[in-house]
Image (tube, helix red, strand yellow):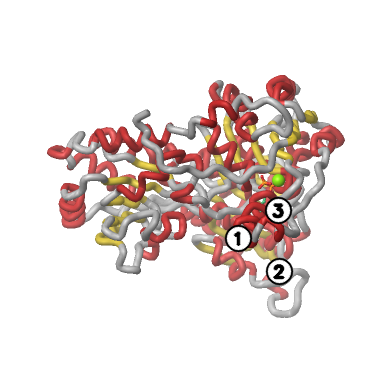
Amino acid sequence: MPERGADLVVEALVAAGVRQLFSLSGNQILSLYDATIGSGIRIIHTRHEAAAVHMADAWGRLTEEPGVALVTAGPGHLNALSALYGALMSESPVVLLSGASPLGQAGRGAFQEMDQAAAAAPVTKAAWMASKAERLSEDIAIALDLAKSGRPGPVHVSLPGDLLEHEVEGSQDRLPAIHRPPIPVANADLRRLLELLEASRHPLILTGSAMSRPARAGSVERLSAATGIPSLAMESPRGVKDPWLHMATTYLERADFVLLLGKRLDFAVRFGGPPAFTSACRFVQADWDAEALDGSGRVTLGMMTDPALLAERLADSCGAMSGRWRAWGELIAAARRLVPDEWHALRRKPGAPIHPLRVSAALQPWLDRGAILVADGGEFGQWIQAGCEADTRLINGPAGSIGSALPMALGARLAHPERTVIAALGDGTFGFHGFELDTALRYDLPVVVIVGNDARWNAEHQLQRQQYGADRAVGCELLPSRYDKLAAALGGHGEYVEEPDDLEPALERAVRSGLPACVNVMIDGLAAPTYRHASPSH
Ligand SMILES: Cc1ncc(C[n+]2csc(CCOP(=O)(O)OP(=O)(O)O)c2C)c(N)n1
Ligand SMILES: [Mg+2]
């Protein structure tokens, strides 16, 4: 029976276990919409293409299976790209499928014709345009496989409208799953690494985004448990100054050896230089990709291998050194838990405007009961990240973009329908994708969004104050808007909180409402926390 190219695409997605497409419709992808009918694949349609990609990103990070976004050509595709950058930097398996103008009209000024693969190239592991209807199943299988192999990341395929409509005779060969063997650890490299480690008094492991997620973090934990070497996750754009690392950030300069596992020697680690690290500190880097290995000469040994595999090999080979760095490891672990003394009072601080740590104190019991935390950037986001511990946490990631938290919360709820999902974001950030509360309502995804409302783009306001002076802060003012009323107007639940003691009951009502909810909290617009040196022994 003849099938359309669009049917081949949907069948290939179904065969790979894809359950939903995060999408926004458009002329060039309507055949795909049609092909989903009766296929078992659900379309989650959103209010902005970037939101669709953020949802796919959350799905990818939480399941390690590609989240698939489907958008239309030209402007739809371009709208998706900024969110793809977030997925790239967070090393999240995502596949972006974009409709494209017909191949039959190529070069003739077709509607929304543009070089979509070229536009997506800088924010993907691979990007191409499908060129034959008969090969569409293969395009999809390869894209899904690439997204999750090695360093996970986004992959893009443009799907010209005429290929999708084209009728293909006969059944297509279904591709078997593609398995890539892991890149083995070279024995000579392992020996050299052990030598360097042996000479070290204060070794430290830093992990990148993918290596910090549960699927791979277990290997690092095993290595840490065997040796005592502390490990820290570098997931934040604030890198070595990530407030979530608490006082551990002040101990990095004591490290004399750093093992980078799937973590580039980039801006987040201040390129391995002072004042974050001493110039005597040695670096060894293990990464899936040769291009990610540092070329500046700062790294003593660069290894192209699966970093999780290296952690396992090292844990198995460190026999004589087992437990050697236990005391140092415990010092860093204690520092990671240590927050400034004054925080304990701030978490209970009475009076308006509400201190952001007071919000994190109200939020923490929900996280203790298993809620997923999704935190955005900006100063409020940093306070929440610093003040909360969650088993499962999604943050904006090294891309440092704002806006992802609300759509990511929806992706998280789809991945974990049984868990409460709470997103924390600033008032400015809420404006990016606030209308996804409508998507949440349509798909019965009752996420709770806490908006820290300080009526400004505070992160930038604070930078202006620091860099140019308190009297030269310009262009960052917002209104103390009633975002809770917006949620209610869309059919969700709204809570407005000005007094600290109203936080707990408002959150309780928001979660219990069973609706997508916005808790609009009038907060004190403070600069994000920083840490001074302190001894974690007391
Ligand atoms: C896509 C994008 N645009 C702009 C920025 C710059 N930026 C970072 S934080 C921030 C302010 C965020 O304001 P808000 O959400 O209100 O949080 P606040 O800092 O006020 O707590 C801005 C504009 C960015 N990181 N990403
Ligand atoms: Mg703000």
Q: CA distance from mark 3 to mark 2?
A: 21 Å
**Given contact means CB atoms under 8 Å apart, are the residues at marks 1 and 3 in contact?**
no
In the image, residue 280 lies at what x, y percent? 26, 58
Residue in view at x 23 percent, y 44 percent:
314
Instruction: Place residue 31 in its image quadrant.
Output: bottom right
Does any portion of residue 173 appear in the rendered image?
A: no
In the image, residue 250 lies at what x, y percent? 40, 45
Residue in view at x 21 percent, y 45 percent:
201
Residue in view at x 19 percent, y 37 percent:
324
Q: Earlier in the sequence, mark 2 or mark 1?
A: 2
Helix, strand or loop at mark 2: loop
**Neighbour class for label 1 at 10 Å: few (<14), some, many (≥20)?**
few
Disc 2 marks which residue? 102
In the image, residue 171 lies at what x, y percent? 57, 53
Please, which residue is most extreme toward the right here? 489
Disc 3 marks which residue? 49
The amino acid beneath tag 2 is: Pro
Helix, strand or loop at mark 1: helix
Q: CA distance from mark 2 to mark 1?
A: 50 Å
Q: What numbered label is drawn on residue 350?
A: none
User: On the rendered structure, is 373 left or right of 534?
Assistant: right
Instruction: Place residue 518 in its image quadrant.
Output: top right
In the image, residue 328 lies at what x, y percent? 27, 37
Callout in the foreground (3, 2): 3
